């Protein structure tokens, strides 16, 4: 199973890339994490936010392969404990599909993307900065994998 993170926003600072890579390189090939950056929709002083979200949504749709299990990361999604995430990841492996995680831009995912997702997951009721979301996702996926294989990382 491959996990792809489609995240709106580009040009993350080096510390973000280093943080993500710390966990990505620990994951086995059958539980790998790929990150694809999606350019922001056009924003400016008097930008049309709905139009910007629609642009982001189309860019995300263009990256979808059609045979993936889609998980939208949204504040209104269901919060999972680490153990629940491990259970979800185990269920994902049984699907025989790759997983795609969607992270919207500053204004969230466009509603049509949320509607097409198989699950909605909330990392926190807090508004989190996108760079930290990427690192948190990588770490939590690694932690979930360690739970599944009985690795001592999660104590």
Image (cartoon, grey):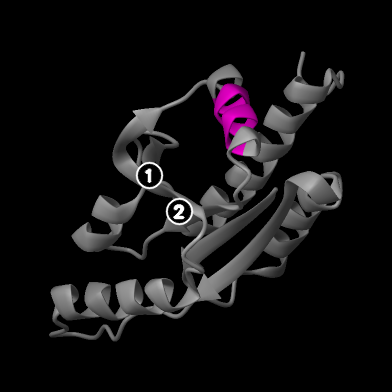
The disc label shown at residue 118, or none: 1
Q: Nearer the viewer, residue 52 or 118?
A: 118
Q: Which residues are magenta?
A: 85-92
Q: Nearer the viewer, residue 84 or 92?
A: 92
How packed is label 1: few (under 14 Cα within 10 Å), some, or many (20 or more)? few
Residue found 35% across the figure and 37% down from its top: 126
Nearer the camera: disc 2 or disc 1 = 1
The residue labelled by disc 2 is 129
Label located before the other in sequence (2 or 1): 1
Q: Position of residue 54 (x, y in %)?
A: 23, 76
Q: Is residue 130 shown left or right of residue 12? A: left
Q: Nearer the viewer, residue 102 or 88?
A: 88
Is residue 90 shown in magenta?
A: yes
Q: Position of residue 141 (x, y in %)?
A: 66, 38
Residue found 52% across the figure and 20% down from its top: 81
SS at badge 2? loop
Q: Is residue 153 shown left or right of residue 142? A: right
């Amino acid at each position: 199973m491959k996990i792809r993170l489609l995240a709106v926003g580009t040009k993350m600072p080096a510390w973000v890339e280093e943080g993500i890579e710390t966990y990505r390189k620990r994951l086995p090939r059958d539980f790998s994490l790929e990150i694809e950056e999606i350019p922001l929709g056009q924003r400016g002083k008097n930008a049309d936010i709905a139009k910007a979200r629609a642009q982001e949504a189309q860019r995300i749709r263009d990256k979808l392969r059609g045979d993936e299990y889609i998980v939208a990361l949204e504040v209104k999604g269901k919060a999972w404990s680490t153990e629940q995430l491990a259970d979800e990841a185990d269920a994902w492996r049984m699907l025989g599909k790759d997983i795609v995680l969607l992270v919207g831009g500053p204004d969230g995912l466009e509603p049509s993307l949320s509607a097409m997702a198989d699950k909605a997951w909330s990392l926190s009721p807090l508004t989190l900065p996108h760079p930290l979301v990427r690192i948190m996702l990588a770490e939590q996926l690694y932690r979930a994998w360690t739970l599944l294989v009985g690795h001592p990382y999660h104590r």
